[in-house]
Amino acid sequence: MKIAVLYGGTSGEREVSLSTGKGIIKALKNKGHDVTGIDFNPEKLDEILQLNVDLVFLGLHGKHGEDGKVQGLLDMLEIPYVGSGVLASALAMDKSKSKQIFANNGILTAKSKSFHQDHYKDQNEIASQIRSAFTLPFVIKPNQEGSTLGLTIVKKEEQIKPAIEKALLSDPVVLVEDYISGREVTVPVVGSQGNEKALPIIEIIPKNDYYDFDSKYQPGGSEHIVPANIEQALTVRLQAEAIQAHQLLGCNVYSRVDFIINEEQEPIILEVNTLPGMTPTSLFPDSAQIIGWSYDDLIEQFVMLSCENRSK
């Protein structure tokens, strides 16, 4: 097939996307496809408008890639692509909206509240509202951002203002949520809509205090235990809730769903990643290897699922 891989982009996750794109391009070529790589930039849309390919594989992360905007452009051009559509992508990127959907459908989430900077006269007012609504420790982060960029675990009062400022650099909406301590796990989901399956669960043990940007992408930044050493009943629940979350948002082909297992051994959902990392240190490929899929096989599986969608 003639496949274009969009990677790079302009978000804070550009470097990660460059690595993801390189891996996807190599895998597709190894599987015999005719591949064109495009370092995507919204100011160079001609590259997309002039595409003549069978399929687009999105290797983008973060804004202008994972949030539905590129998906909408490709839909208008009637160019098929791998992964979730506009609505699912936008909902998954909007953490506040997706948390509401999960909570309304019985999936446990951390208590949270969003603060739009335009609704308050200044950051001091936002800080005051946060103090009255939350007790330390809590998390302040951008509502729409990936890879924990702009996130602060607030343990002291004096961290609140700097945390708000940091989050607002990425998004005009600040999301505050209770800090949940526990084991961090993630569940890859793959399949056509209505026929999804969960791959083996991965436990993430970061070298830093939490699974931050460096822990995710620096070699040796975290340890991945796969399959996670979790009792069977909890394993079944995590995998079922991962598929449920994927379906509630309307995701397609693949996603990765992040959870914290709290001290009561309950899974608390964090977020759904519609375009999870596919770098050499990424989680999804680690899990796929356990069921016998090489990296190249995994990428090809996504292509085949996308082709099945087109033929329906």
Image: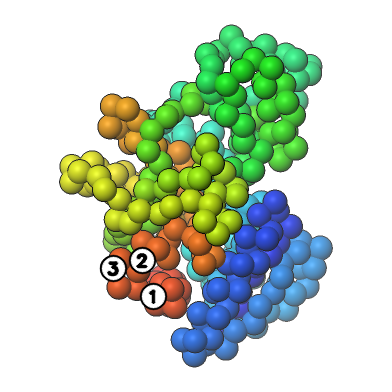
Looking at this rendering, what residue extends furthest in the left direction?
232
Sequence-earlier tag: 2 or 1: 2
Using residue 44 as the reference point, say whether residue 206 is left or right of it.
left
State the CA–CA distance, disc 2 to disc 1: 7 Å
Residue 288's disc number: 2
The answer to whether the residues at label 2 and label 3 have Cβ atoms under 8 Å apart is yes
Q: Which residue is mark 1?
A: 294
Distance CA(mark 3)–CA(mark 1): 9 Å
Q: Are marks 3 and 1 in contact (CB under 8 Å)?
A: no
Q: Is residue 80 left or right of residue 248?
A: right
200 to 235, vertically: above or below: below
Q: Residue at x 51, y 39 (%)?
A: 210
Report the amino acid beneath label 1: Ser
Q: Which residue is mark 3?
A: 291
Observer able to see residue 113: no
Q: Residue furthest right?
A: 43
